[in-house]
Image (cartoon, rainbow, N blue to C red):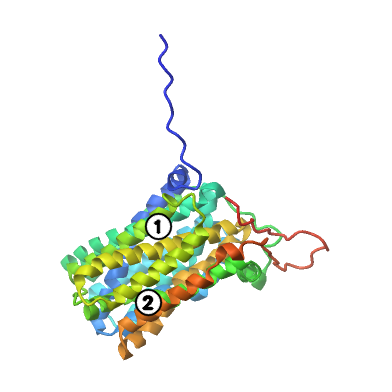
């Protein structure tokens, strides 16, 4: 008697996180990056607490954060151009190796004791240089690993793993900082880069043909700006992210100041680690929800709702003066933060053609990672002259204004335009690098 046929589990819906994880190369790179990001967040939180404890100055804290992420303002454009020209796998390997060596140098410097402020800034800036080359390249490889159909799930998963690392990293970093000191945390982070390097050795990333619109010299370098100029969705997405990073997010870098001055929490205590962990948990929920429960929904309205939710929760967080309710509010704040950023990133990624993806995602890295430290740099003196509450207040007001500006559905109602001027084009010929229409999967 024949046995009844076994039914296979249904295939995951396109664009979901499950579908993205079904791609081998993406899965390997995802877990390698996750392990490395845990070390990065161990270092990020420890570095802020170490810098504030070393000098007692919120201004120097802002300088350290600017040195770490500031190179994205200058070098992301170069990194994006290289990502559209060179072998992306080799470029990622070079960037990860440079960051590993610079992080090991930071650990050595701190282990020697009483490092100068200048030497700390230099070494942290070297780490930032590697990061500026890495981020646009990593963003550009996602479609090559999963295809356009599963791109939204890959972006959501990438945000989720980064924010899971934001939770696990500070928890581990807090334990290691208390038990062994800052140098041990930085040394552990240097080791975690090996996971990302090993993943890159194992995967194969298809090479993207540059095509006739690649250009040379400055035209190649400025290709991302040309796309942003001619496509309203790309332009509005990048400007929204830049303003959000500059004016709404400085409270993250000044979280030790928020804890100490507003909530009565010692930045070197476990209570501070819990505060940061709650923020990270909220960010995980926000990022994961975009690739799961909201996977089938249009992302443009999610961006605007996320901005309004962020504005309300940031205003409440600014008004708090006790630790108890702060843990709940900061969780909601983290959720609104990364729901917004993840949805905005998906809208942008789905709009782009592969041949210009690296250069446009370089502008995203500038708008997100590069502008954030500039906001920290500006916010430090404002905190010293007024208060961290004032900084969070203008962040909440800005988020409301951006919710009105970020009408991405309306901006994308017309056909996208792209004019990369790479020499003369015969009359009536189509653009050399067309941008996919708004409904591209």
Q: CA distance from mark 2 to mark 1?
A: 20 Å
User: Quarter of the image holding residue 61?
Assistant: bottom left
Question: Would you call the spot at circle 1 few (<14 residues within 10 Å), some (14-19), or many (20 or more)?
Answer: many
* For residue 183, side relative to residue 5 (left or right): left
Q: Nearer the viewer, residue 368 or 356?
A: 368
Q: Nearer the viewer, residue 87 or 134?
A: 134
Residue 175: image location, x then y, percent: 19, 63
Residue, far bottom: 385
Q: Is residue 52 above or below residue 91?
A: below
Residue 283: image location, x then y, percent: 35, 61
Q: Is residue 33 above or below residue 221?
A: above
* For residue 251, side relative to residue 84 (left or right): left
User: Quarter of the image holding residue 185?
Assistant: bottom left
Residue, far right: 427
Residue 146: image location, x then y, percent: 51, 47
Which residue is under mark 1? 287
Rendered-image quadrant of the N terminus: top left
Mark number, residue 67? none
Say which residue appears at 29% left-offset and 67% top-offset.
330
**One can see residue 113 in this view:** no
Which residue is under mark 2? 250
**One can see residue 274 in this view:** yes
């Amino acid at each position: 008697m024949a046995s009844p046929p076994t039914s296979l589990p249904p295939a995951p819906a396109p664009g979901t996180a499950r579908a993205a994880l079904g791609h081998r190369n993406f899965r390997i790179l995802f877990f390698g990056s996750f392990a490395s990001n845990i070390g990065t967040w161990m270092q990020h939180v420890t570095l802020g607490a170490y810098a504030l404890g070393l000098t007692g100055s919120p201004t120097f804290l802002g300088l350290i954060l600017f040195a770490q992420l500031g190179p994205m303002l200058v070098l992301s454009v170069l990194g994006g151009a290289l990502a559209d020209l060179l072998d992306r796998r080799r470029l990622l390997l070079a960037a990860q190796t440079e960051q590993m060596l610079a992080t090991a140098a930071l650990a050595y410097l701190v282990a020697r004791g009483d490092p100068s402020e200048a030497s700390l800034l230099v070494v942290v800036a070297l780490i930032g240089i590697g990061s500026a080359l890495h981020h646009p390249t990593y963003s550009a490889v996602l479609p090559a690993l999963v295809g356009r159909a599963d791109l939204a799930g890959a972006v959501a998963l990438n945000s989720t793993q980064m924010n899971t690392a934001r939770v696990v990293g500070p928890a581990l970093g807090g334990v290691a900082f208390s038990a062994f000191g800052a140098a041990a945390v930085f040394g552990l982070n240097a080791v975690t880069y090996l996971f990302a390097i090993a993943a890159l050795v194992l995967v194969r990333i298809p090479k993207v043909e540059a095509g006739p619109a690649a250009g040379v010299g400055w035209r190649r370098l400025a290709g991302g700006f040309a796309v942003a100029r001619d496509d309203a969705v790309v332009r509005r997405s990048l400007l929204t992210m830049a303003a959000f990073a500059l004016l709404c997010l400085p409270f993250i870098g000044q979280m030790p100041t928020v804890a100490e001055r507003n909530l009565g929490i010692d930045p070197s205590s476990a209570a501070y680690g819990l505060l940061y962990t709650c923020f990270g948990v909220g960010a995980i929920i926000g990022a994961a929800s975009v690739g799961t429960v909201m996977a089938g929904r249009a992302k443009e309205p999610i961006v605007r709702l996320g901005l309004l939710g962020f504005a309300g929760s940031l205003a409440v967080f600014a008004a708090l003066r006790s630790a108890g309710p702060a843990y709940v509010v900061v969780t909601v704040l983290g959720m609104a933060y990364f729901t917004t950023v993840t949805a905005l990133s998906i809208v942008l990624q789905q709009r782009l053609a592969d041949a210009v993806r690296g250069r446009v995602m370089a502008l995203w890295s500038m708008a997100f990672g590069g502008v954030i430290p500039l906001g920290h740099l500006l916010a430090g003196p404002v905190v010293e002259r007024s208060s961290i509450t004032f900084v969070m207040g203008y962040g909440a007001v800005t988020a409301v204004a951006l919710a009105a500006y970020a009408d991405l559905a309306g901006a994308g109602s017309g056909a996208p335009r792209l004019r990369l001027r790479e020499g003369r084009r015969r009359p009536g010929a189509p653009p050399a690098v067309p941008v996919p229409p708004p409904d591209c999967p």
